[in-house]
Amino acid sequence: MSSRHRVSLIPGDGIGPEVSEAAVRVVEASGVAIDWETVEAGAAVVAEHGTPVPDAVLSSVRRNRVALKGPISTPIGEGFRSANVTLRQVLDLYAAVRPARNLPGVETRFSGVDLIVVRENTEGLYSGLEHTVTPGVVESLKIVTERASLRIAEFAFGLAERQGRRRVTAVHKANIMKLSDGLFLECARRVAKAHPDISYDEIIIDNCAMQLVRDPTRFDVLLLENLYGDILSDLCAGLVGGLGVVPGANFGDDCAVFEAVHGSAPDIAGKRVANPVAIVLSAAELLRHLGEVEAADRVVKAVEGALSDPASRTRDLGGSAGLDAITDAIVEHVGGG
């Protein structure tokens, strides 16, 4: 019997509560005992707390050390700061891990895709450090530090070793940003020397994007700074069916947050037509993180089994099933049905 776990649950906005509920159902069907501590974050709490991430959310994640999070809306060009960025920076969740792997029943242009994007999560242009210099002139700051670059490189190589991966590829634009991206590469090279069993190479980001859409099977683990990782991780998701079928995780030294990385899709919220696969697969990674490896493997196989049946596929995957139908199918497969 597995031990009992306590996990923070952040349902999110839009379709977040629906798909989070589906993930909880699947985890419960796996037989793993989890006490869920639900805390609210996102647009709905801004008026009351003045922030999309109240202190109660941060305290819960720090206390439980692990969380499952649904999608949270972020205003474009105005409004409150991204809740996702806030969580990553305040909790120092410095490593974003985004696997991209073909799933049965999900038709794509490529087969045999099985790669992992490892993204530095706390600095660089994506941090949103901006100010107006003078009317009509805005400056954004790209901060790259030796400390953050070394630890994300160490994380990538450690992940490669634990998962039996062959190669880490650092993605950069050091031909233009010679100091910032140059420091990132210098740190990656230093770490690579300490891991001689893992092959290491480098590629300029624009060439990497082209090579990914030509033959993504040539890549194994991609190591990127923050903004590059945000962009290319979505590209890699598109190679295997989209953001609705890939898990996401954010790791720090003290805690981890597992999440669906797609949007909150407010236009279909409440209609029970959303695809829950991404957050279910993220929940499987959460189980693996908790040491519940057998249950995690069963959840992944259950998703694959459900997607193998056209009747269980949601609209974004070419089918007509709703949220409840695909969740029911996954739950049935988890139970051995």
Image (cartoon, helix red, strand yellow):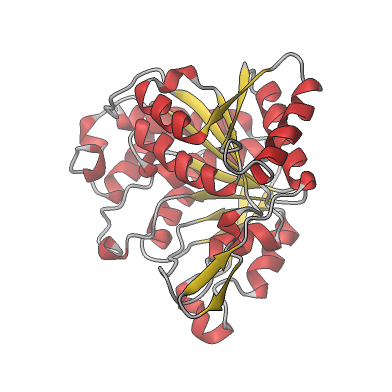
**Residue 17 image point, x, y percent:** 42, 62
Asked if 302 appears above or below 219 in the picture, the reply is below
Near-viewer residue (316 or 295): 316
**Residue 57 image point, x, y percent:** 63, 68
Instruction: Classify residue 295 as left or right of residue 218.
Output: right
Image quadrant where residue 101 sits: top left
Res 96 visible: yes
**Residue 55 image point, x, y percent:** 67, 74
Asked if 333 appears above or below 46 in the picture, the reply is above
Could you tell me which quadrant the C terminus lies in? Answer: top left
Identify which residue is drawn at 27% across, 57% down: 272
Q: Residue furthest top?
A: 197
Asked if 136 appears above or below 189 in the picture, the reply is below
**Residue 333 image point, x, y percent:** 39, 31
Identify which residue is drawn at 52% across, 70% down: 138
Res 41 visible: no
Near-viewer residue (123 or 80): 123
Identify which residue is drawn at 62% across, 35% down: 288
Asked if 190 appears above or below 137 in the picture, the reply is above
Identify which residue is drawn at 48% across, 62% down: 11
Near-viewer residue (227 or 71): 227
Image quadrant where residue 40 sits: bottom right
Instruction: Classify residue 239 as left or right of residue 107.
Output: right
Q: Residue furthest bottom?
A: 48
